[in-house]
Amino acid sequence: MFPRLTRFQQTGLCLASIIALLAIFAPLLSPYNPTELHLNHVLQPPNSQFWLGTDSLGRDVLSRMLYGAQTSLGVGLVAVGLATGLGILVGTLAAMGPRWLDALLMRTTDVMLCFPTIFLILAVITFLTPSLLNVMIIIGLTGWMGTARLIRAEVLTLKGRNFVHAATLAGTRHSTLIRRHILPNALPPILTSASLGLAAAILTEAGLSYLGLGIQPPTPSWGAMLTEGKAVIEAAWWLITFPGLAIILTVLAFTLTAEH
């Protein structure tokens, strides 16, 4: 039986669902192609033709916002999926393996945690060509440490439960014990960690795109839109306002979903 959702979780889940639906149906909802130029309507404020205005190249901001949601959520989901998978693998091996393996994996995790994530990402991405795939992989490979520590602690707790002892005495193999008895019972903290990780991944992608090290033009990205709007902020307030609100609401949605 699923636990009852709190009011914060319900609000976050509802908001996240709306954002996800907007991203999924972006091709149907977008009034224009996100890369289409309207050179006669450069830096137009929000109006009846362009609901959220146009940018310095005459591109429709609403269309770019909707396709930008696809980019941000896509990066977040792939990065969190990679980070969560690595975290589960490392945490489970550390908890179920011999002491030397536990010590090796946890000390490696501690060393990785010593470096601020954003600096670690910047150090790696400077050696690679900025692209959508590289951003997904880099964020995923630098975000597994917290999940690994969480899963290790949860698995160690579950190892002491009576149902695990009973399954062990019955001759259940380690792989089956982990797959059928331990990981399913560790699912709530995994989902909580993944939800928070998704919010962090979206924020990181936006930051990298803002710095010009993330998603490259002409692919729509909320962070890149902020960078473009910064140069004309006094003349075009909407280029900063709408992408900024989108990032705030998306991060808030997944953070609320993870609340207890």
Image (tube, rainbow, N blue to C red):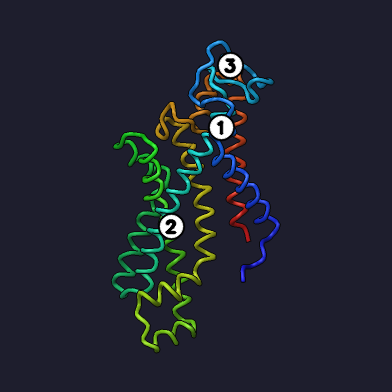
Residue 113 to residue 96: above or below: above
Residue in front for this viewpoint, 73 or 88: 73
Separation (CA) of disc 3 from disc 1: 16 Å
Where 86 sits versus 183, above or below?
above
Real-space CA distance between mark 2 and mark 1, rounded to the nearest whole angstrom: 28 Å
Question: Which residue: 40% across, 33% down?
Answer: 213
* Label 2 secondary element: helix
| x, y percent for residue 88 | 41, 63
Q: Which residue is mark 2?
A: 84
- Residue 65 circle label: 1
In the image, taking residue 68 as reference, residue 126 lies left or right, namely: left
Label 3 vs 2, first from the N-terminus? 3
Q: Is residue 239 shown left or right of residue 206?
A: right
Residue 247 pos. (x, y %): 57, 39
- Answer yes or no: do the residues labelled 3 and 1 have beta carbons within 8 Å? no
Q: Is residue 39 left or right of residue 78?
A: right
Q: Residues within 10 Å of mark 1 (few under 14, many from 20)?
A: many
Residue 170 placement (x, y as % from top left): 39, 88
Disc 1 marks a residue whose amino acid type is: Met
The image quarter containing residue 94 is: bottom left
Which of these two is toward me, 40 or 85?
40
The type of residue carrying mark 2 is Thr
Q: Amino acid at mark 3?
A: Leu
Can you name the residue that lies furthest to the front here? 28
Label 3, on which residue? 43
Q: Which quadrant of the view contains residue 28?
A: top right
Q: Quick check: 159 above or below 133?
A: below
Label 1 sits on a secondary structure element that is helix
Q: Check disc 2: other Cα within 10 Å, few if <14, some if 14-19, many if 20+.
A: many
The tally of labels here is: 3
Q: Secondary structure at mark 3?
A: loop
